[in-house]
Image: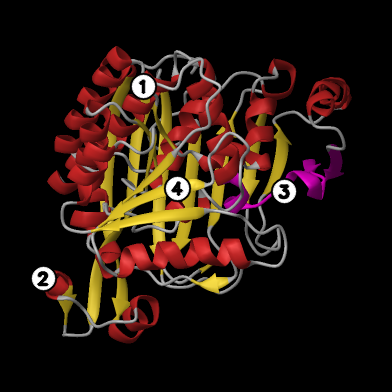
């Protein structure tokens, strides 16, 4: 089933979709993907919600898609998918307790896999994922996770600037108390997707099924720390990662909030996490403090019910010997990500070097400028580069298709995916012990 060196169109299979990311892979049509898509799932609200989103994309006024969904619903959906082999790439975004097993069995059966994060939420599933990568390599299959944050322009430019020694210097190792790298993301249960309020499945609030905050959305932070700070470098997770500490804590969701998001009451499997009959305690927040190649890194993932203003947000700072590179997304930034350069020594020599090095950034991203403000610079980014989170799914899919066609995924991708999930699943074990 390997698609390497093939000019044939990719035939997608969507397996048991339970997360809106499965639909976002199909928000735009790509020429290398056959419009016929095969869906295998158990009957229920999850798959219906997915199909409704695809229908909305097909029926929208501007740039409608033309997907043809062939749907099989039944308890034997997985064995049916294996036996029929109607597609060659399985897209997975749904209940995370099942996902790793789906990945392993799909790879064993000869399918390529494009999986939403997280691909493993605990140590047991991390072991299963390792085995899946071994089989994928032997069968020349592409197993890849959807890292949309690599396509966000402020993240890209933060990485580009960190690779310029005259601008950034070198990355500080820092200490556990004052890390060289600090990142924090805040997500919200109540949010809009493709213009509508998102209805989340009830299992999303069960960390045994969804995973805790750091093990789910925190995967993006671990990925960015690796990708930004050590570009193209292979990580050996057994030797290159050491842990300082990890912790986790709960977010409160009351019954009326839960009903607004899920359109239902608390299910029985959540009773163990409910206090005073009306408040659900969700272990949605987590923090890990660790060393990567000797650099101290602190990553924090948080969830709240609903944003006061704006949406999901991120803060990130890379501490360099010549400057700090900072992404903020608060009220001052109008709740959109803004990149700042904060030099250690702001003098004419540094400014001259910065302006000279800016040319290499502008060669790749024409229109990017710097605005001097206070003791540093704000990076001015043209609107054309700000595609938005939903558009990034198509960009990841295009990258995946190129790996599939040419079998040229960079050598660092697989070991660094393993390092990523080793980091998040080990952090969970440490947090629970604490």
Vertical comparison of 123 with 19: above or below: above
Which comes sooner in the sequence, label 3 or label 2?
2
Image location of residue 261, percent across then percent down: 38, 76
Instruction: Judge whether residue 390 is colored magenta.
Output: yes
Q: Mark 3 points at which residue?
A: 386
Residue 251 appears in the rendering: yes
Image location of residue 95, percent across then percent down: 27, 54
Q: Mark 1 points at which residue?
A: 141
Vertical comparison of 27 with 48: above or below: above
Out of 106 and 129, give the one closest to the viewer: 106
Q: Which residue is drawn at 37% across and 67% down?
A: 48
Which SS class for mark 1? loop
Q: Distance between the residues labelled 2 and 1?
A: 41 Å
Vertical comparison of 314 with 139: above or below: below
**Magenta stretch, residue numbers:** 369-392
Q: How far apart are marks 3 and 2 (CA)?
A: 42 Å
Can you tell which mark lies on residue 272?
2
Q: Residue at x 31, y 33 (%)?
A: 421
Q: How far apart are marks 2 and 4 (CA)?
A: 39 Å
Which comes sooner in the sequence, label 2 or label 4?
4
């Amino acid at each position: 089933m390997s698609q390497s060196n093939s000019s044939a169109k990719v035939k997608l299979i969507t397996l048991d979709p339970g997360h809106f990311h499965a639909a976002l892979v199909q928000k735009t049509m790509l020429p290398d993907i056959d419009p016929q898509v095969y869906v295998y799932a158990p009957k229920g609200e999850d798959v219906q919600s997915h199909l409704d989103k695809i229908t909305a994309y097909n029926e929208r006024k501007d740039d409608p898609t033309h997907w043809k969904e062939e749907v099989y619903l039944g308890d034997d959906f997985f064995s049916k998918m294996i036996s029929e082999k109607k597609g060659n790439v399985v897209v997975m975004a749904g209940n995370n307790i099942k996902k790793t097993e789906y990945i392993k069995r799909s790879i064993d059966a000869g399918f390529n896999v494009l999986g939403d994060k997280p691909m493993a939420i605990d140590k047991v599933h991390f072991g299963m994922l390792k085995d899946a990568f071994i089989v994928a390599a032997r069968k020349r299959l592409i197993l890849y996770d959807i890292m949309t944050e690599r396509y966000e322009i402020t993240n890209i430019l933060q990485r580009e600037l960190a690779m310029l020694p005259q601008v950034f210097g070198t990355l500080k190792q820092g200490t556990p108390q004052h890390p060289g790298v600090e990142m924090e993301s805040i997500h919200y249960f109540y949010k809009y997707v493709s213009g509508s309020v998102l209805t989340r499945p009830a299992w999303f609030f069960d960390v045994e099924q969804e995973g805790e905050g750091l093990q789910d959305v925190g995967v993006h932070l671990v990925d960015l720390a690796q990708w930004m700070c050590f570009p193209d470098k292979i990580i050996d997770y057994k030797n290159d990662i050491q842990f300082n500490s990890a912790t986790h804590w709960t977010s409160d969701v009351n019954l009326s909030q839960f009903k607004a998001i899920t359109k239902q009451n608390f299910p029985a499997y959540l009773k163990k996490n409910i206090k005073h009959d009306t408040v659900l305690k969700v272990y949605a927040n987590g923090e890990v403090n660790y060393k990567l190649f000797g650099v101290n890194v602190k990553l924090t993932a948080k969830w709240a019910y609903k944003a006061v203003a704006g949406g999901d947000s991120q803060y990130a700072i890379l501490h360099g010997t010549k400057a700090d590179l900072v992404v903020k997304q608060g009220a001052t930034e109008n709740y959109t990500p803004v990149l700042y350069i904060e030099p250690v020594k702001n003098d004419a020599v540094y400014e001259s070097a910065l302006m000279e090095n800016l040319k290499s950034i502008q060669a790749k991203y024409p229109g990017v400028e710097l605005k001097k403000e206070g003791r540093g610079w704000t990076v001015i980014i043209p609107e054309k580069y700000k595609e938005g989170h939903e558009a990034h799914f198509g960009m990841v899919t295009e990258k995946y298709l190129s790996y599939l066609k040419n079998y040229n995924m960079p050598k660092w991708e697989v070991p660094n995916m393993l390092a990523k999930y080793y980091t998040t699943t080990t952090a969970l074990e440490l947090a629970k012990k604490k």
